[in-house]
Image (tube, rainbow, N blue to C red):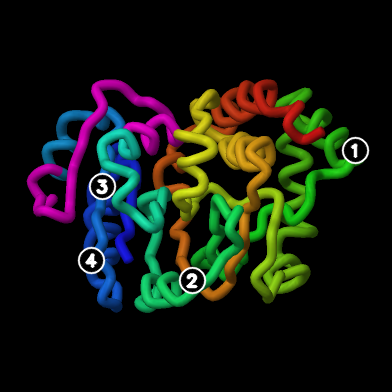
Amino acid sequence: MRVAFIAVNYNNYLISLNNVSNILSLKGDVERDVIIVDNASDEKDYHALKEGFIESDHTFLVRSDKNLGYFGGLNYGLKAIDLKKYDYVVIANNDLIYRYDFLEVLEKSEYKENCMVIAPELITIDGRYQNPQRVNKPSKKRRMSYDLYYSNYVISQTMQFLYSTFLRKKRKERDRVLTKTDIFQLTGACMILTPKFFECCGYLDDSVFMWGEEVLLAHQVEVAKGVITYDPSLYVLHMESASVNKISSRKSFKMTKASYKIYRDYYK
């Protein structure tokens, strides 16, 4: 089995270097290639990344001359490799730690013929389980709540506060899915693409700059009559938001609202 790992770096070179070291240390007699895409970081960060990065036949550093966004950066990495060589391509944030047996478990796992994307068990450092993000498409009532959320910044902050205070903490274990199952939407921090995805969909839909990419991916798979499969036997620790934690809440709201306008109809 041969697996490619692609992650995007943006002004956090230490996290990227640790990500590479983690992937190379994973157990298993599995050939792996690691591609880090620098998404137009400032010169100081890129220089530090380049200085600490050890390029080899299986580790590659590529750089975009402009910030392409999350899926745009991942597409840049996908286009830098020969996709036909790989059994799986893991596209992900750089702020992840894969469990030691990640590749061994992946090699032994079996999936449906029309499986295009695999969602691993993604756990945050405070113990929240992020997959599946959605087993089914959101209901009409839920879509109305999204419209309300994105109607106004103050409303969005109020709704977010209520959610984090009364619901988020209670969902650490509640509603957790314990078995392999097909889902509508995963969390975009870590996605495992199969050859079927590239055969039917080509590259990622990168029409949003940041946030909402998971809906675009779900739509691509749905149109191609494929499935996204959640596999809780694949463990990944998510350090969470290493690339976006410096963005102000008001700016992030504007960005997510702009993305929502693009993907809103895909929820219907």
Q: Residue at x 62, y 42 (%)?
A: 221
Judged from the image, the secondary structure of the residue bearing numbered disc 4 is helix
- Kind of residue sitting beneath label 1: Lys
Say which mark, if any, is on residue 217: none
Question: Which one is earlier in the sequence, the residue at label 3 or at label 2?
Answer: 3
Q: Name the residue under label 1.
A: 140
Relative placement, left or right, of 43 versus 195 is left
Relative placement, left or right, of 165 versus 96 is right
Judged from the image, the secondary structure of the residue bearing numbered disc 2 is strand
Report how far apart the C-alphas of labels 4 and 2 lie in the structure: 16 Å
Residue situated in front as seen by the camera: 225 or 242: 225
Report how far apart the C-alphas of labels 3 and 2 lie in the structure: 21 Å
> Does 52 appear in magenta?
yes
- Kind of residue sitting beneath label 4: Leu
Q: Name the residue under label 4.
A: 24
Report how far apart the C-alphas of labels 4 and 1 lie in the structure: 45 Å
